[in-house]
Amino acid sequence: MNYLKFKSLAATLAGAVVAVAPRVANACAMCGLSPNDPAGHAYNSSVLFMLASPYVSFAAIGGITYFVYRRARRDEDRGRPGADKR
């Protein structure tokens, strides 16, 4: 039980230090920048690009797959050689 009290006391003390001293709590790159710093815009833009990249990748793969499927169906309907006959 003594170890649990020590652990909770240490967590409380660490939380108090972080709450009292904001300079210690600078965990991200944006926290230490001034409001008009151009680096803040760069960080925001890079985050938006990282958030959008999975959606763009999924849309590109889906679009290519759909295009190939439609081409195969069109070739099959026209009876071109190499088309898969059922």
Image (spheres, grey):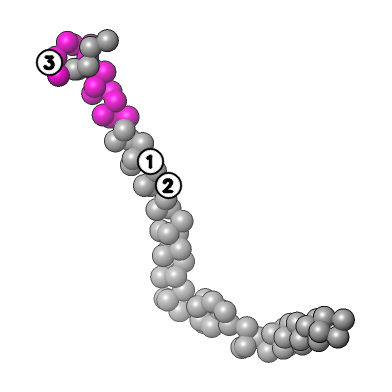
Where residue 82 sits, quadrant-wise, is top left
Residue 75, magenta (yes or no): yes
1 left or right, relative to 41: right
CB under 8 Å between callouts 2 and 1? yes
Residue at 65% in and 86% down? 22
SS of the residue under disc 1: helix
Q: In front: 51, or 44?
A: 51
SS of the residue under disc 2: helix
Q: Which residue, given by chain and number where applicable, does mark 2 sit on?
A: 55
Residue 33 is tagged as none
Q: Which residue, given by chain and number where applicable, does mark 1 sit on?
A: 59
Is there any visible trace of residue 35 in the rendered image? no
User: What amino acid is labelled 1 in the image?
Assistant: Ala
Range of residues picked out in magenta: 66-82
Tag 3 or tag 1, which sits nearer the N-term? 1
Q: Which residue, given by chain and number where applicable, does mark 3 sit on?
A: 81
* Residue neighbourhood size for the residue with mark 3, other residues' Cα within 10 Å, grouped as few (<14), some (14–19), many (≥20): few
Where residue 28 sits, quadrant-wise, is bottom right
Where residue 9 sits, quadrant-wise, is bottom right
- Name, please, the residue furthest toward the right: 1
SS of the residue under disc 3: loop
Q: Quadrant of the N terminus?
A: bottom right
